[in-house]
Amino acid sequence: MQISRQTMQLQTVEILKALFALPGFDSVSIKGISPASPDDSQAVLSAIDASWHDILSDVDFKVRIAVHPSLRSLAKPLSHTLLSLMGLTDGILGLTLQGNACEIQEEAVETVRLCLATGYRADIIFEIQWNENVPPLSACENAPCPSPCDAFWFIAVQALGKLLRRDYLIADHLAHMLIMEGLVLQMEMRDAKYGTNIHRYGYGEVPAYQNTDTEAFAFLFDKTEPAGRRTAENLCRAALTYNALTGRDSSNESRREIFFALWNCYLQGL
């Protein structure tokens, strides 16, 4: 994995190409800079200069797009459908969505926060206008909704960024959110085992994260100063526990590998 100003620029151009190809696309800006096309190299370079601070930097897109009103019937966020049409959903490490245009009659806003498997991070704000003159987006009904797994790994990347920028308060808060996700999974597994979610007494279960061995990844958090080491251990433990509790399915297993590769890449680049 390699993350640099150049790779940020290349991936940004690819996203711009996909945005400009969307039906109903109107405009896009990055840090107030509006490329006239994906080939507007001067504007793209200026946008990257404004976005790049270090290897942890992300790119902020603001996109105006018109969408046919018939899509309100889907009753789910449109932004994931837009990502699918852009060809991004198969290459995502983590993802969160905010807002649902289908619940709003007038112009609406949906925000996508994502980290690709390449380590590229972006926030995409879709400003959505309803317009009957725009053809309905294709394949909308088949676009999958984000899963809890998508959100887990995005928050893990967020926590990692805060950890490496020495914001241990937020990093530890996010790491504990991830540990709580593992505890919820463990409780759901217990409910399934006993056929009920009502338990007058517990069964002496040990929270899985407490027994998760992090020794194989100690080289990552050994490089963290003492004030942040426990937070780094918690983040590592949360990621490994979640992977184990979700049954080591192929999708989640690969995301775990990408996450730890990203962690190592960040350390090498800072």
Image: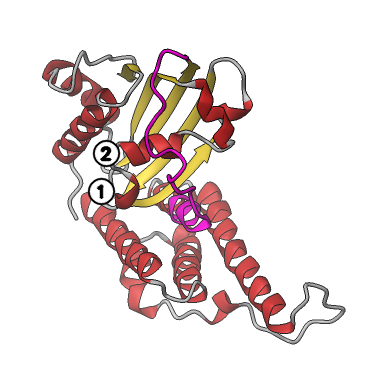
The residue at the point 42 percent across, 76 percent down is 214
- Part of the protein shown in magenta: 131-156
Say whether marks 1 and 2 touch (CB < 8 Å). yes
Q: Quadrant of residue 138?
A: top left
Q: Which residue is mark 2?
A: 54
Left or right: residue 103 compared with residue 233? right
Q: Is residue 58 above or below residue 240?
A: above
Question: Is 42 displayed left or right of 161 in the figure?
Answer: left
Please tell me in which quadrant of the rendered image residue 123 appears.
top left
Say which of 182 and 146 sits in front: 146
Amino acid carrying label 2: it is Asp
Horizontal and vertical percent position of residue 20: 25, 23
**Quadrant of the image containing the N terminus:** bottom left
- Image coordinates of residue 257 in percent, x first then y, are 31, 66
Frontmost residue, 53 versus 140? 140
Coloration of the structure image? secondary structure
Residue, disc 1: 270
Q: What type of secondary structure mainly makes up the magenta span?
A: loop
